[in-house]
Image (tube, helix red, strand yellow):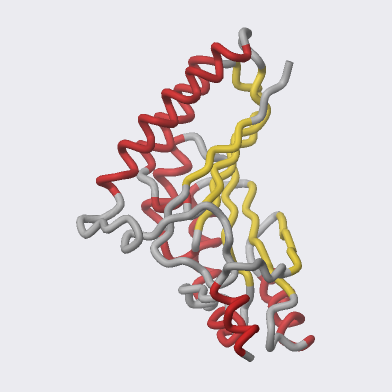
Amino acid sequence: MDLAFYIHIPYCIKRCGYCDFNTYTPSELKITTGLKSITSSYTNLLITEIKSARKQVGERAVVPSIFFGGGTPSLMEAEEIKSIINVIGSEFDLASDIEITLESNPDTVDKEKLEKFYQAGINRISFGMQSAVPHVLATLDRTHNPDNLYQVTKWASEVGFKEISVDLIYGTPGESKLDWQKSIDTALSLPITHISAYALIIEEGTKLAAQIKRG
């Protein structure tokens, strides 16, 4: 039996205006000493849950993929990610060609951190590009500079990643066809192997939905 893992990391430095995922910011958690104080405890809880899953499954299933999503998984320490991968490997059988993906915001990593993630066992990295146009990123409340995308994807390639992906969002209020074309052209110019494109869905209860209602 195959058993794929999705590991949710529910922490972000800032909540994006369109996001309705289960995420928490330091201010919402009333943390003033950095996320490390809570990610370590969360890692231990994940390890406990993985061991519980092994008991529920009742057999050493083969794991073809592990996906760290969020939230912003790249806010975690590489050692924490490695410990999660290791416990999955101790409780289940990792496929020889396993794909282990980590989602990352471009402004939360440098070359050193990307290398640590690669050494921890991540073999596919996915960057939340969303757009190459500053005013579109501003509408989405994204914090990164679009000019940094080439640098972080280049770093990822240099440290060993063979699978590098970027996410794009289309249909943002105020985004023109030329804006969308620029985002596509920019993504195609990057040293990447995959592009995921998603239509923006305005979810009730989000900051962006409230802004649209106000006009």
Residue 179 locus on image (x, y percent): 71, 85
In the shown orientation, is residue 77 left or right of residue 136? left
Given the current orientation, which residue lies at the most extreme top position?
59
Query: Is residue 97 shown to the viewer in this render?
Result: no
Viewer-side residue, 147 vs 3: 3
Q: How many numbered badges does the structure rendering display?
A: 0
Q: Residue at x 48, y 18 (%)?
A: 51
Given the current orientation, which residue lies at the most extreme left position?
33
Residue 37 locus on image (x, y percent): 25, 46
In the shown orientation, is residue 125 left or right of residue 10? right
Q: Residue at x 60, y 88 (%)?
A: 214
Q: Residue at x 72, y 60 (%)?
A: 195
In the shown orientation, is residue 67 left or right of residue 179? left
Residue 200 locus on image (x, y percent): 71, 70
Q: Does residue 119 lie above or below 153 as drawn?
A: above
Query: Is residue 93 shown to the viewer in this render?
Result: yes
Q: Quadrant of residue 48?
A: top left
Q: Does residue 183 lie above or below 83 as drawn?
A: below
Residue 167 locus on image (x, y percent): 66, 62
Viewer-side residue, 55 vs 122: 55
Q: Quadrant of the C terminus?
A: bottom right
Given the current orientation, which residue lies at the most extreme right position?
177
Q: Residue at x 51, y 56 (%)?
A: 104
Q: Does residue 62 lie above or below 128 as drawn?
A: above
Q: Quadrant of the N terminus?
A: top right
Viewer-side residue, 172 vs 122: 172
